[in-house]
Amino acid sequence: MCFGRLTMSGGQVKVGDISVFNVETFRRGLKLCLSNHDLWVKEAKELYDKGSYGHAYVLLFNAIEALVQSYFCWLVLIGAKKPDDKEFIKVFYEHDIKLDVILEFILTSVDYKKYLENKYGLVWTKEYSERDLKRDIKRLQDAKGRFRKEKLDLRKHGTYVVYDDKNKIFFSPEDIEREKVATFLGEASIAHNVIKHLICNTSQEIVDLLREESKHLE
């Protein structure tokens, strides 16, 4: 299993100005999250191949969330994230932050970037005024909200039998079409490839950059 270029030795390490934490705890966390991700993917594929697309989507959703959790463990290990940071804690309890990270990684793909820009109305301005920057940030926040709702609704429909009171109909996980799962599979694969590459192949220069960026966010 790949742990990337983690040069820290075992024992106690100080990150920034916060208290000491145990490196082996977060090494184990990284390992557990990656193992959990791999198991979810394996089981999702089995269900997908059997035509159980709703349940396959749910397991794939869980898999990509586990990968985001591994990414945050890695950020702690390289010193770019503090273990008592609110974002780090939330990534193990809330869907929203994980889905936001997934969308950000998907936008790094040239192919999917254009697709998502059209889907969520992400039209970036070429000017760099404060007003234009605020407008772009709002567009991204709106896109994240729509992305979260879409994925969480599909997760709910892939898990439970849902009753639509307005239309007086039931919706079953078996009603989810293969194409919807295939679409998310393509999106998830982008985040998967980026995160796995970061953890396994990141240069020291990138690690230093991430550390420096984290200081500006404090």
Image (cartoon, rainbow, N blue to C red):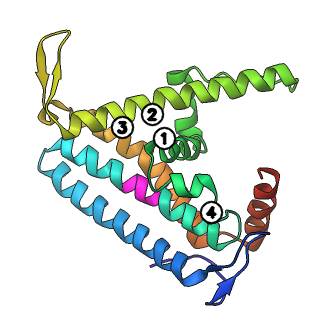
Q: Which residue is mark 3?
A: 183
Residue at image x 54%, y 57%?
A: 89
Could you give the CA–CA distance between mark 1 and mark 2, rounded to whole angstroms?
Answer: 7 Å
Would you say the residues marked 1 and 2 are in contact, meaning their CB atoms lie under 8 Å apart?
yes
Q: Which residues are magenta?
A: 63-67
Residue 99 in view of the camera: yes
Between discs 4 and 1, the one toward the N terminus: 4
Q: CA distance from mark 4 to mark 1?
A: 19 Å
| Element under disc 2 | helix
Name, please, the residue furthest toward the bottom: 10
Can you tell which of label 2 and label 3 is closer to the viewer? 2
Q: Left or right of 177: which side holds 41?
A: right
Q: Position of residue 182 (x, y in %)?
A: 31, 40
Write down the quadrant of residue 57 in the picture: top left
Q: Is residue 195 above or below residue 108?
A: below
Q: Choose mark 3 or mark 1, whichever is in front.
A: 1
The residue labelled by disc 1 is 96
Look at label 1 and name its amino acid.
Asp
Q: Which residue is mark 2?
A: 148
Assess whether residue 186 is covered by the magenta stretch: no
| Mark number displayed over residue 73 | none
* Mark 2 and mark 3: Cα distance apart in space: 15 Å
Could you tell which of marks 4 and 2 lies nearer the N-terminus?
A: 4
